[in-house]
Amino acid sequence: MRRIIITSLTLIAAALLVVPASALAQTRSKAPAPQITRVQPMRVAVGGTLTISGRNFKAQRRKNTVIFRSGTGRTAFAKPVRASKRKLVVRVPVAVARLLRVAANAQRPTRLQLRVLAGKFSKFTPRRLSPVVTGAGDGPGGPGGGGGNVAICNDDADHDNDLLLNSEELANGTDPCLADTDADQMSDGWEYYAAKDLNIKAAPYPGERPYPNALDPSDGGAAGARSSSIDFDGDGLTTLEEYRAWRFTGSAFDAAKAGGTDLESPFGYSDGTKFSRLNEAPGPPSWQGPVYGLAAPGYAFPATYNLHGDAPWRDDERDADADGLSNFLESAKGPGQPAWWSAFFASERMKAEPWGSKPATTCGQEFGYFKERPFASLDIADHDVDGDTLLDGEDDQDNDDISNIAELYEVVYDLDGDGGFTCGTITYPSYDLDPGPGVDPHGINAFNPCAPNPNSRTCQDWKPF
């Protein structure tokens, strides 16, 4: 009997504990969502202040979040500077500038929807409650309106440190609050001066396309992209690659080279000229192989870098990451990418069958496109893509004991000096290596372990069909 009474009392106590918790959960689930009923002003610049009236906000300001949304679905977030249950005061953050529409090389006033998160989400505001937001320097009156909001990004001459004065940015249509107005991974100042380089520097800045343009995201790349497809100065390096090379080498800016009519650039790398540093010979690499008992590459540097055989140093010949491979060899359009070889061997001058196909060889050579194994692509701003501490030049992508230097340079000039080889009616000018006296030259491929040596330690013993 006592056991029954104790059990009953336990169940009753547990029930009493459960009821408040469930009641609390029910109360929370019924808590009303915030609602926006008024927004003032209805036109505001980035950095300006908005007052949002409504109900069911949180009295503690940090428990509220204001969300700005563009017509494309992109968003930016801000915490109010003051808050009550019926009113939020929020400063339009710099991040909102990325949501503004860009047309004719300038940010345009853009209507943005608002939403409040205060425990629950409010609905997005309809058009009548969605303010028009302008650029930081435009003020509430629109471009040139003199609204005074420039002061928020005018604490020094170049607030965002992008090498453009605040006044220059306002004149060009770029945002003095943002180092990269069009969010293409390249800073406004670099794109500005690269365009000046392309325009022979002495001429005014070309504000319209096609030039490297700080208001044109298409000449860079989406977030995380390795490279874009645009190469304004024609040196084989894309705009984004030259920017990355500049950043990798220290982001130097030589104001003395910003004027005049010479071919050099104020930057170490520019997509406005092939000759950013035409008189600066690249230094020899610091080989790491000898640390592990491996022989250093037996090539003379900087002479090996010279892809064009002339005196001035072009950007494609230099070596941003100092790994022994000229920039073009590691570029997105060069032979440091495995996919490059597919087009190379399919070209009219080569006509080499893919490795493992029928016929299995071309003139007895097994140097066609190879895809049996994955290989790391090379990068002009990464001196060791596979992380083994060897520089990419002295390394060996396909592990056939022929260095990347030997195989990659041979496709752009006759590195070994043997003049190429002839097979039937086809003469291959320099795309080969000579293994030694009395041995026929073999076709090469830095991403094929069977070329130039079909008996290398990593060549497949069993050929695919």
Image (cartoon, helix red, strand yellow):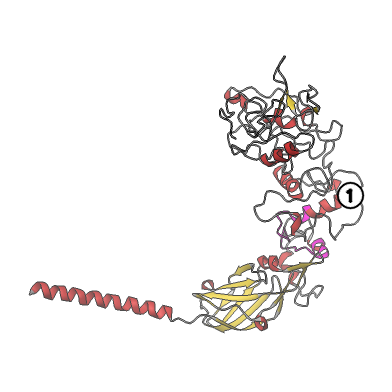
Numbered disc total: 1
Question: Would you say 276 lies left or right of 339 here?
Answer: right
The magenta stretch is: 168-190
Q: Main secondary structure of the magenta part?
A: loop
Q: Along the line of sight, which residue is nearer the eye, 152 or 401?
A: 401
Q: Under tag 1, what secondary structure?
A: loop
The residue that disc 1 covers is 259
The reply, left or right, for residue 115 in relation to residue 429 is: left
- Which residue does the image show at 70% across and 43% down from the upper left? 248
* Residue 148 is a magenta residue: no
Q: Is residue 314 above or below residue 205?
A: above
Residue at the front extreme of this rendering: 358
- Amino acid type for the residue under numbered disc 1: Gly
Taking the spot 65% from the left edge, 77% from the top edge, the residue there is 50
Q: Nearer the viewer, residue 155 or 19?
A: 19
Residue 107: % across, % down = 77, 68
Looking at the figure, which quarter contains the N terminus?
bottom left
Is residue 184 magenta-colored?
yes
Q: Percent position (x, y) of residue 84? A: 54, 80
Q: Quadrant of the C terminus?
A: top right
In percent of width and height, residue 323 lies at: 69, 34
Q: Quadrant of residue 126?
A: bottom right
Seen at 57% across and 79% down, the residue is 123
